[in-house]
Amino acid sequence: MNKTISLATLAGVVLILAFAINLSPIDNQATAQETTPFPSREKVISVTGTATTSVDPDRLVIQFGVETQEKTAKASLETNSQLMTNVVNAIMAVGITEDELSTSRMNISPIYDYYNEPQGKRTQELVGYRVSNILMVETQSLDKAADIIDGAVEAGVNRIDSVYFTLSPQKQTQFKDLLLEDAVMNAKSKAEKALAPLNHKIIGVKLVSLSEFGMPPPMPYLRDGFVMAESASMKAATPVFSSDQDITTTASVIFLIGSN
């Protein structure tokens, strides 16, 4: 009796396994078909819009400094510090405050004299130290540019790195918001004009990519030698003129489109 039951049970197990093996490929195929995504049927158009405007600068930036050379680092630093104190006093006398002044960089470097020995060996000799102290003036008093330069040069400045006009962070934010809106509207206008002869229209937005607020790199208005020569030899103020700056931004938009 037990033997008969065991054979019957074994036959049932074999039948179930065979049935499972026959069904598994079908089940796997059905599962793969269900998880395979359908290709997108969206119709899109990608357009880049641009917005540009001309803005009056509201910030003056001047970088100038004093370079001194002495036999010892201490002597060069002391001479430099005295001259820089005179420079700061001179530009504060024309209305520049301490909040508008900052040290851009300061450097102390050895100076070597190179020569050839009788045996032909090239050697070097320490002859002194050079101290360079660069000061930055950032002010919204644009009309004081000439007074700042002339006063600084008369007080001891012997290098002027740059003089340029730019926008304050507050004004940059103001125009950034304005230009981004105009750039997006420009992209929409381009898309509508392109779709009109194709009998299609915009029905939605898929993606918007905004660029950073762009300004041209600051360009120096005066060169070192010209500024110092003019200021030292002429009684008239050094001429410095501000000019409008063209700023721009872009917005790339992918529109969803459909037929009219």
Image (spheres, rainbow, N blue to C red):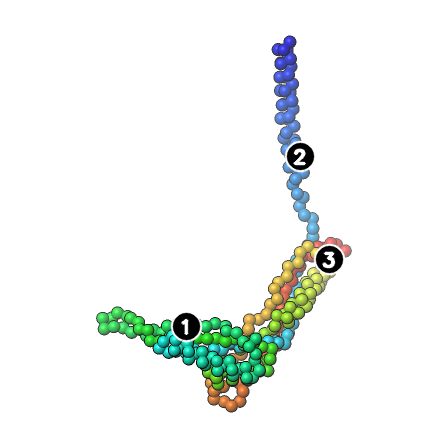
State yes or no: discs 2 and 3 in contact (Cβ < 8 Å): no
Disc 1 or 3, which lies upstream in sequence?
A: 1
Can you tell which quarter of the image residue 196 is in? bottom right
Given the current orientation, which residue lies at the most extreme left position?
Answer: 119
Crowding at mark 2 (Cα within 10 Å: few <14, some 14-19, many 20+): few
Q: Residue sitting at 39 percent across and 75 percent down? A: 74
Callout 3: helix, strand or loop?
A: strand
Task: Select label 1 or label 3 by which is in front.
Answer: 1
Q: CA distance from mark 1 to mark 2?
A: 77 Å
In front here: 135 or 238?
135
Task: Select label 1 or label 2 by which is in front.
Answer: 1
Residue highlighted by disc 3: 202
> Horizontal placement of 232 versus 190: left or right?
left
Disc 1 or 2, which lies upstream in sequence?
A: 2
Image quadrant for the C terminus? bottom right
Q: Residue 108: give its label.
A: 1
- Tell me if residue 91 can be seen: yes
Q: Residue 19: give its label.
A: none
Residue highlighted by disc 2: 30
Q: Residue sitting at 54 percent across and 87 percent down? A: 237
Residue 113: percent from left, percent from top? 32, 74
Q: Kindly identify the amino acid type of the residue bearing the numbered disc 3.
A: Ile
